[in-house]
């Protein structure tokens, strides 16, 4: 049931709620704060590395991430 | 009306010129990470260079140099003061988890080259290399950004990477190794990571993204620095931990970014992960940005992470008997974490900005850490 709700929500987002945005209306979207991972890619890499070395799960935030021995 | 049309054109051309401006920059950052109880301390200076070549190529390179010092937990025979040896008769009451001091240094270099095509689709290929005293990794990656139409309101992203790992199993840590004649062993493992995503602009101020991912790790996945206590009916023994040599994980991630008003923007992500080691995790990462003016940007973040334990994990010293797979590494246990984040970014000129950050990480396994970041970015 839950997964159908998620699917339905996604469909609603992609069909009903989406408005066509012209290229000159994308000033907000060009801002770094709108990027997934935030405005500073290096700080995001730091964070992901800390989480990856202290927790048991990874993946989802891009495929290039490096690794560690993680004592 | 006559005035509005030229103004719109001027605005559009200015916006385009700004959006298409080359993103050539150098970023220098420094991370200082401290765990409570002096368990682990990390100093990590980092350098990133991003350079556009014309409008069709972009080169990015990142170098990180970590200096790590601290203490790693292991079961120890307190009667002898040593971490024991396989098969030796021990008493359970003498076995305790203690911290052993270690020092390490990590050098990591990652580069990527992006090719933009006529329709602005992008192909990125990357290579990364990381080296520590007891670990080496080589990673190859590629991703393709596909715009669904000319309006560029929706894009698809296909990414994949392959990582080759070499892990040092030191004879001194290996209970199966004869200390007088044995030598260190380099073991290998590989990681395949695949991700497919979609990003959709909803309106002028909001966008949503979603992706599904698959990750496979195979080879030597045991941590050579961790041990367990086994008790199969006679006396307890200290032995190497042992993990399965394959792990399949997959999940999905959704992201929603919204400019609430001209000063405040929210950017939130939810990730679900599950794997065949019986570990499930949920992550909610929510960030709020406040643009005080054109120069000062404040960032406030809150991250919540919840994880279930691996099927072969147990932290007790009287649990394992003859199980094939066994680990007492607390990172495979069931826990939750909360991270509080605060960042300041101050743009001194159009080409130079400073940033500072203070973060606090609280894990329910009694692990607490504070990390500060400081750095600058220069556009050229």
Image (cartoon, rainbow, N blue to C red):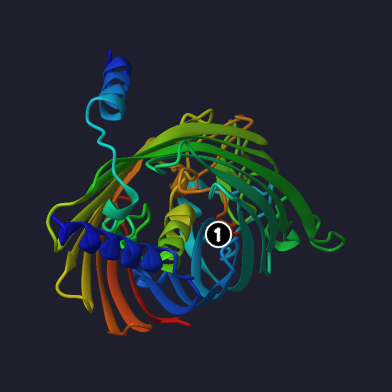
Residue B77 sits in which quadrant?
bottom right
Task: Tell me if B32 is positioned left or right of B287 in this view.
Answer: right
Q: Which residue is under mark 1?
A: A70
- What is the quadrant of the C terminus of chain A in the image? bottom right
Residue B159 lies, in percent from the top left, at 58, 43
Residue A70 sits in which quadrant?
bottom right
**Would you place residue B180 above or below residue B338 in this image?**
below
What residue is drawn where x is 64% and y is 31%? B324
> Which secondary structure, mark 1?
loop
Q: Is residue B273 visible?
A: no
Nearest the viewer among B205 and B333 is B205
Q: Residue furthest right?
A: B181
Residue B95 lies, in percent from the top left, at 50, 53
Task: Tell me if B128 is positioned left or right of B21 in this view.
Answer: right
Q: Residue furthest bottom?
A: B348
Residue B46 lies, in percent from the top left, at 51, 76
Q: Chain of mark 1?
A: A
What residue is drawn where x is 61% and y is 71%? B106
């Amino acid at each position: 049931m839950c997964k159908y709700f998620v699917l339905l929500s996604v469909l609603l987002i992609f069909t009903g709620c989406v408005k066509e945005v012209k290229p000159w209306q994308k000033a907000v979207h060009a801002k770094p704060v709108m990027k997934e991972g935030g405005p500073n890619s290096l700080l995001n890499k730091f964070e992901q590395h800390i989480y990856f070395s202290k927790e048991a799960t990874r993946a989802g935030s891009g495929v290039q991430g490096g690794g560690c021995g993680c004592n | 009306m006559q005035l509005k049309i030229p103004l719109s054109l001027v605005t559009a051309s200015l916006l385009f010129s700004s959006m298409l401006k080359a993103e050539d920059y150098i970023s220098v950052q420094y991370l200082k990470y401290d765990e409570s109880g002096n368990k682990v301390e990390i100093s990590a200076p980092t350098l990133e260079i991003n350079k556009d070549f014309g409008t069709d190529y972009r080169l990015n390179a990142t170098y990180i140099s970590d200096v790590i010092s601290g203490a790693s937990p292991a079961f120890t025979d307190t009667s002898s003061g040593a971490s024991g040896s396989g098969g030796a008769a021990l008493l359970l009451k003498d076995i305790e988890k203690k911290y052993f001091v270690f020092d390490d240094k990590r050098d990591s270099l990652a580069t990527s080259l992006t090719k933009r095509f006529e329709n602005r689709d992008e192909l990125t290929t990357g290579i990364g290399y990381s080296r520590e005293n007891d670990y080496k990794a080589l990673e190859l990656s590629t991703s393709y950004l596909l715009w669904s139409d000319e309006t560029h309101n929706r894009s698809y992203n296909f990414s994949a990477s392959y990582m080759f790992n070499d892990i040092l199993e030191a004879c001194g840590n290996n209970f199966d190794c004869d200390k007088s004649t044995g030598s260190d062993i380099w073991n290998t493992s590989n990681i395949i990571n695949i991700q497919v995503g979609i990003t959709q602009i909803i309106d002028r101020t909001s966008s949503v993204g979603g992706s599904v991912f698959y990750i496979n790790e195979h080879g030597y996945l045991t941590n050579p620095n961790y041990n367990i206590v086994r008790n199969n009916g006679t006396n307890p023994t200290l032995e190497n931990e042992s993990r399965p040599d394959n792990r399949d994980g997959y999940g999905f991630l959704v992201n929603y970014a919204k400019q609430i008003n001209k000063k405040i923007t929210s950017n939130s992500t939810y990730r679900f992960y599950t794997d065949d080691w019986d570990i499930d995790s949920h992550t909610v990462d929510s960030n709020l940005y406040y643009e005080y003016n054109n120069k000062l940007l404040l960032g406030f973040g809150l991250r919540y992470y919840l994880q279930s334990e691996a099927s072969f994990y147990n932290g007790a010293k009287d649990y394992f008997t003859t199980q094939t797979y066994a680990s007492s590494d607390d990172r495979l246990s069931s826990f939750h974490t909360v991270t509080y984040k605060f960042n300041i970014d101050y743009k001194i000129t159009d080409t130079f900005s400073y940033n500072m950050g203070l973060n606090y990480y609280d894990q329910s396994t009694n692990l607490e850490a504070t990390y500060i970041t400081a750095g600058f970015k220069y556009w050229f």
